[in-house]
Each structure stands twice: as structure tokens, then as C-alpha cells.
């Protein structure tokens, strides 16, 4: 039976082969050999079989088995690039770039030729592109102008197990598309996955398993109730270096803060004796410059031990070879959304058991390994078994706008894998109505269509649209671009006082967003001088990035024939435009009472107590009314990105907003 199967494929392949151009590119022999050593390669024929014979295919394989790098290339070999592009989604921009680089090498081309990628504000594809990696958000956006995804002959939704909201929405949209497009191959791929649930969702689709090589990993728990996982991670790294045999270490922490702290400690405080390896510390988190990520794949030198300190990106998105020791903090940073407060906060939460198991697995790829869990077995037993899908815990405003733009009028018609909470949908609909992006009947409006054409969150898109009416597009473009990058102010741990001093030179009574705009404009006056940035504790790279984002937004505005104007020294229209985007983040100063601190603010209409962040230029000004960009929770709930407003603007900019003052 099996033979017949493969003969059938062989026939199909032969007929394709005449059409497929032979690859004349030169690929180094060691790269070809590496491809053949991947676990997926042993199943290549069977897999190609399955691809040819199935409309929808679910592929499960351990991290590192070769799914992300090989699947698109196999699809190409099957001949699918003849009728369109092969699109493969990733969840993180960094993973998109890293994997594209690798596959371009394997195909013997430059990035942007046959193999390219698209991430927000960066399109590295061309007419030639056959294999396109992109974030799931980009593919979803693509659906808004090409509902049938007609440019693609195959779509791979990779890493579906993580259940990001964009992947979940794509699953629903693609389920709808494939009913209309017989010629579109859909592949759902993941490291671990509830394959039955996915298979049922796609009417009993075939599940293909790639068994990976996995060596046993010894799990060592920490029997103590330790709260200081950073210190405990540092101690464990040192213990491994001084007592355990050769092999690299992968440490899972949560984000830039704890990763930099541990990196600094191991780089500057720890001095291994000549008996032990030197540590080669490699931090990995999304805000790091891309060039630095390449270090992950560089093998350690003879006298070195690599220590990769990463966020959950190293769980499944990036595979690092050579890891023997994993140290798991048991924490992850996750967006937590409260629809009642309309607040989205990034908080440290416990990982799920599934994630902890994934992390452990990273130690068993090259040989037997050890995983040090910085928590106890009984704590592990209390972890949730799987992470909650993002669709259940995030703001849906942007998603609902995109779905409306694609053409789903009634959201109840959509067949979700896990339905989002009704509360959150209703909240999103209300918010879109306040933005005047949809009308009372739920149809998208002209404003809504315009908003959806910008690759921005709805509030930033709304700001841009209003700024055209108020005649300050030049200013708002800069602000929106700056809000789309990470913090432009540098605050190195060892020079915090100096950095704060430098920042205070830019303070203005017009708030943090105008302050950022002023920094950007001054930087332009210095002809984008890097030294000027250095002296003023400004992140030059972020300004460059903002500059390029600004250019791209400008292009979109020009293509939509929007009027470009500056309000020059008049800041009122700029502040009003900000208010139009952020009215739902409004806070009012509490009346001063002797028994209450005078910097308390209260959000409306949700009545939460919030505070002005000490780094804000509004810290001493304390305006009566403010709008904020976001709330971060550290010791308290702090507002960041604060803009002073006049409360009458709220009524002007969002007439139906119920303030309940
Ligand atoms: P999976 O998606 O199944 O987790 P991948 O296809 O991502 O597996 O990885 C296959 C192999 O390719 C791994 O050994 C990984 O280390 C290697 N690899 C992936 N990207 C790069 C890169 N940019 N540089 C070097 N090696 C890479
Ligand atoms: Mg992968």
C-alpha cells in the first residue's frame, strides 16, 4: 500500500519536475550535509507524499527537527512555487529574520531574492520571491487587501501551539478561504500541539508526526521556595561551569531587565579561575539589535562555554545547537488584559507545564542533558497545564477592525478554535464605534477603512487621521513613529543619575510624547549625529528605526492622498490629536486631600488609581487631566507616555465617550 502511495507521488513529482527550474546556485557542501542530518529528512519522501495528497496537513515535530527551515523548501520541491508563493508564518520578528537567513543560504541566494521575508515596516521580498517568511500579523494584514490570499499557493502556519491571537484568527480565516480555494495548501505545524483538536477543527485533517532525536534529560528541582530566581540562576551557571563537564548553557529568564542583570553579573563580577571555562555570554531578547543575534549560532571556542540567556523565544522559535544544560526560572512575561479596566499589562507569570517541558527538552538535542528548574516539584504541579490562548486574554480592538476590513460583518459567523470572551468582543466593538471606525450596524466606515490601511494599532491610526483634519500630520507622524519603537531614552544601570539628568534637559510642559518629538527634531538638526545621542543618553538605533518607520507611514499617507501639514509652534492641534487616539486612557488628578498623596490619579470611567511614572516629564507638573500611552505595573500602577489635555477636548474628539465625570 505504501509503495503505491509513493509511486503516485513520484508520478506527480515527475510531471512537476519538467516545469521546475533546476537550481543552478552554488550551495556549500557542508550546508547540504547539515540539511540531510535533520530528523525531518528521514521522512522527506513520506512527507512530500502527504503534502501532495492533502489539502490541509498538520505536522508535529520536536523543536530542531527542521520544520521551519525545511518545510517551505520541500513544498518548493513539490512544485508549489509554480503557481504562487509559499508563505510561512513565525511569531517573532527575530525568528523571521534568523530563519530567512538560514534558508537563503541553503537555497544559495541572497535574502530578498528567491527567499525573502516581511515583518512590520520591513519588506525584504521581490518579484523573484518564492519562499516568504513573515510574522503571523503580516499575513493577517495581507488578508485585508487580498481576501483569498491569491498570491500564495501554500501557507504554513508555524508554531501554532503557541496560539497567538493572530495565528488563531488566521486559522479561522484560512478555514474559510480553503473552502473556496482548492488549490491552496494549508499546513499547520508545531512542536507540541493538541493535534486532535486541530485535526477536528479542520474536519479530520491528516496528522503527520516527525519523530525527533531526543536524549534523556535529568530534571533537578530546587527544593527551596526561592523567590530570587535571578540570583539562583547566577549561582547555578557558576556551579555548572565549575563542576560539570563541557556543554553550553541555556537560561530562561523573562525579559531585558533580568537578562541584562544576569549578563552583567556573569560578565563583570564573576571571574572563573584558569581551571574553568571562560563564559561567553549571549543575551537574547527582542529589543536587541539583530546583528547580535547571529552570535547565538557561533560555536564556542575551545576554552569557552556558551551561556545563552534568553526569553521564551528560545523555547521553540530559535533552535540553538549544543545545549546540554538548561536553567529554567519558571517565569515568562505575558500580556495580561483586563477588559473591565481596558488595561493591558505585561507581567511576569508562571509558565505552564507544557512550556516547562519544552524548555527542558532544549537540553536533550545533542546528547543526554540536565535541566535545573529553579522551583520545586510541588510548585511545578501547581503550574497550569497549558498556556491560555492569547485570544482569551487580550484586547481585540485591532483584530476586530481587521476582521471587519476582511469582510466579516457578523463576528458570530466566524468559526474560532477557541472563541474569544464576549466581554472583550463587545468592548472592542464599543471602542471601534467611539473611533467612528464602525457604524451602529457594525459595518466598517470610511474612517475605519483608512485606519485599517495603516500597519498600526487603531489608536495610533486614528491619531494620524485626525491630525490631517487638524493640520499637524508632520508632528503626529513623528510621534506615531516614535511610539512604534522601544524606548528612545537610554538608562544604563550604572549611570542612572547621569541619564536622568540628561533626560531632564528635554522636559517640556507639553508631556512625554512632545518631548520625544523634540528629541527627534533636535537629532535631525544635528544631521542625525550618533555622538549627540551618546552624550544625551539617547538610543541612536531607535531614532534611526523611527525615522524609517516615519518614511513608510509617509508613503502610505501620500498614496492615500492625505494632506501633509505642520502646525509649527502651535502645539494645541498636536495635543488634541493625541487626545483623539488615547481618550480611552484618560486620568484625572484626584482632589488634594491632606491624607492622600497629591500625585494620585484616577482613570475614567474605570476608576482605577494610577500614578505618574517618575521618569515622566509630567512628574512635577501634575496637570489636572492627562492621557497616557500605557500603564506599567512595578511597585505601583504607573502611567507612561503622559500628555496633558483639556477635558473639553474629550467631548470634542470622542463625542460618544461616556466619561461619567
Ligand atoms: P524546527 O522548526 O523544527 O524547530 P528549524 O528548521 O528551525 O527546526 O531548525 C533546523 C536546524 O537549523 C537547527 O539545527 C537550527 O539550529 C538550524 N538553524 C536554524 N536557523 C539557523 C541560522 N540562522 N543559523 C544557523 N543555523 C540555523
Ligand atoms: Mg520552528
Image (spheres, rainbow, N blue to C red):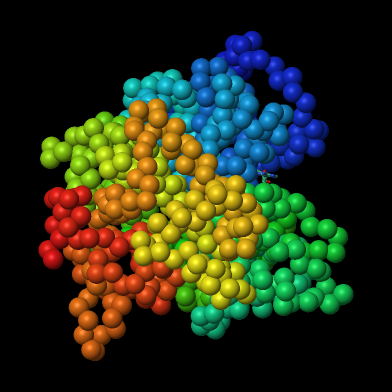
* Displayed quadrant of residue 101: top right
Residue 36 vertical position relative to residue 608 in the rendered view, above or below = above
Q: Position of residue 653 (x, y in %)?
A: 20, 49
At x 72%, y 29%, the residue is 108
Quarter-wise, where is residue 1 in the image?
A: top right
Most distant residue in the bottom direction: 595
Please name the residue shown 69% across and 28% down the image: 109
Figure disc tally = 0
Residue 528 appears in the picture as rendered: yes
> Which residue is at the front of the view, 412 or 658?
658
Q: Residue at x 42, y 74 (%)?
A: 614
Percent of width and height locating residue 55:
44, 26
Query: Residue 560 location in percent, x, y?
Result: 35, 28
Closer to the camera, 565 or 57? 565
Determine whether, in the image, residue 51 is placed left or right of residue 452.
Answer: right
Q: Residue furthest front?
A: 569
Q: Which residue is nearer to you in this view: 277 or 361? A: 277
Q: Is residue 410 left or right of residue 205?
A: left
Would you say residue 637 is visible in this rendering?
A: no
Quarter in which the C terminus is drawn: bottom left
Relative to 372, does residue 554 appear above or below in the rendering? Answer: above
Quadrant in which residue 117 is drawn = top right
Give the image location of residue 88, x and y in percent: 52, 35
Q: What residue is drawn where x is 62% and y is 51%?
A: 529
Amino acid at each position: 500500500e505504501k509503495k503505491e502511495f509513493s509511486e503516485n507521488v513520484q508520478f506527480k513529482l515527475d510531471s512537476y519536475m519538467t516545469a521546475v527550474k533546476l537550481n543552478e546556485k552554488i550551495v556549500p557542501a557542508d550546508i547540504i550535509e547539515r540539511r540531510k542530518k535533520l530528523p525531518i529528512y528521514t521522512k522527506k519522501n513520506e512527507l512530500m507524499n502527504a503534502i501532495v495528497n492533502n489539502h490541509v496537513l498538520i505536522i508535529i515535530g520536536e523543536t530542531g527537527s527542521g520544520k521551519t527551515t525545511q518545510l517551505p523548501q520541500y513544498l518548493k520541491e513539490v512544485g508549489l512555487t509554480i503557481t504562487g508563493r509559499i508563505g510561512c508564518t513565525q511569531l517573532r520578528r527575530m525568528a523571521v529574520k534568523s530563519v530567512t537567513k538560514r534558508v537563503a543560504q541553503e537555497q544559495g541566494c541572497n535574502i530578498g531574492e528567491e527567499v525573502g521575508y516581511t515583518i512590520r515596516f520591513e519588506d525584504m521580498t521581490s518579484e523573484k520571491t518564492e519562499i516568504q517568511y513573515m510574522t503571523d500579523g503580516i499575513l493577517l494584514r495581507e488578508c485585508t487587501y487580498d481576501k483569498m490570499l491569491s498570491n500564495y499557493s501554500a501557507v504554513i502556519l508555524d508554531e501554532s501551539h503557541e496560539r497567538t491571537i493572530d495565528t488563531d484568527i488566521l486559522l479561522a480565516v484560512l478555514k474559510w478561504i480553503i473552502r473556496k480555494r482548492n488549490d491552496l495548501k494549508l499546513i499547520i505545524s508545531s512542536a507540541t500541539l493538541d493535534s486532535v483538536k486541530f485535526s477536528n477543527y479542520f474536519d479530520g485533517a491528516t496528522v503527520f508526526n516527525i519523530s525527533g532525536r531526543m536524549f534523556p534529560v535529568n530534571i533537578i528541582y530546587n527544593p527551596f521556595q526561592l523567590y530570587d530566581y535571578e540570583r539562583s540562576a547566577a549561582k547555578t551557571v557558576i556551579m555548572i561551569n565549575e563542576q560539570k563537564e563541557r556543554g553550553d548553557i541555556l537560561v530562561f529568564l523573562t525579559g531585558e531587565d533580568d537578562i541584562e542583570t544576569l549578563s552583567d553579573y556573569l560578565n563583570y563580577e564573576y571571574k572563573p579561575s584558569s581551571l574553568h571555562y571562560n563564559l561567553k555570554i549571549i543575551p537574547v531578547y527582542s529589543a536587541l539589535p539583530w546583528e547580535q543575534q547571529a552570535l547565538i549560532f557561533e560555536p564556542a571556542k575551545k576554552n569557552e562555554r556558551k551561556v545563552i540567556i534568553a526569553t521564551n523565544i528560545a523555547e521553540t522559535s530559535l533552535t540553538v545547537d549544543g545545549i546540554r544544560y538548561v536553567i529554567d526560572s519558571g517565569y515568562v512575561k505575558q500580556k495580561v488584559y483586563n477588559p473591565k479596566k481596558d488595561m493591558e499589562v505585561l507581567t511576569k507569570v508562571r509558565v505552564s507545564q507544557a512550556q516547562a517541558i519544552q524548555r527542558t527538552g532544549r537540553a536533550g538535542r545533542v546528547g543526554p542533558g540536565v535541566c535545573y528548574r529553579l522551583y520545586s516539584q510541588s510548585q511545578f504541579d501547581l503550574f497550569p497545564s497549558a498556556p491560555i490562548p492569547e485570544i482569551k486574554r487580550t484586547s481585540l480592538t485591532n483584530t476586530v477592525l481587521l476582521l471587519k476590513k476582511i469582510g466579516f460583518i457578523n463576528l458570530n459567523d466566524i468559526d474560532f478554535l477557541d472563541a474569544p470572551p464576549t466581554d472583550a468582543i463587545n468592548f472592542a466593538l464599543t471602542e471601534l464605534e467611539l473611533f467612528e471606525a464602525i457604524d451602529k450596524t457594525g459595518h466598517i466606515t470610511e474612517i475605519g477603512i483608512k485606519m485599517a490601511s495603516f500597519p498600526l494599532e487603531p489608536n495610533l491610526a486614528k491619531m494620524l487621521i485626525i491630525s490631517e483634519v487638524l493640520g499637524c500630520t508632520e508632528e503626529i507622524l513623528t510621534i506615531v513613529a516614535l511610539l512604534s519603537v522601544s524606548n528612545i531614552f537610554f538608562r544604563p544601570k550604572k549611570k542612572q543619575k547621569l541619564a536622568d539628568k540628561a533626560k531632564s534637559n528635554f522636559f517640556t510642559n507639553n508631556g512625554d510624547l512632545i518631548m520625544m518629538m523634540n528629541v527627534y527634531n533636535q537629532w535631525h538638526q544635528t544631521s542625525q549625529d550618533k555622538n549627540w545621542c551618546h552624550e544625551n543618553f539617547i538610543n541612536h538605533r531607535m531614532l534611526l528605526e523611527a525615522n524609517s518607520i516615519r518614511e513608510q507611514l509617509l508613503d502610505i499617507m501620500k498614496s492615500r492622498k492625505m494632506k501633509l501639514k505642520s502646525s509649527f509652534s502651535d502645539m494645541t492641534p498636536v495635543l488634541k490629536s493625541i487626545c483623539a487616539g488615547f481618550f480611552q486612557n484618560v486620568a484625572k488628578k484626584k482632589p488634594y486631600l491632606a491624607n492622600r498623596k497629591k500625585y494620585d490619579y484616577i482613570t475614567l470611567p474605570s476608576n482605577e488609581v494610577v500614578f505618574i511614572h517618575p521618569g515622566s516629564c509630567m512628574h512635577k507638573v501634575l496637570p489636572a487631566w492627562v492621557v497616557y500611552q500605557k500603564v506599567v505595573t512595578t511597585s505601583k500602577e504607573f502611567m507612561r507616555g503622559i500628555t496633558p489635555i483639556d477635558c473639553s477636548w474629550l467631548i470634542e474628539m470622542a463625542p460618544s465617550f461616556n466619561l461619567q465625570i
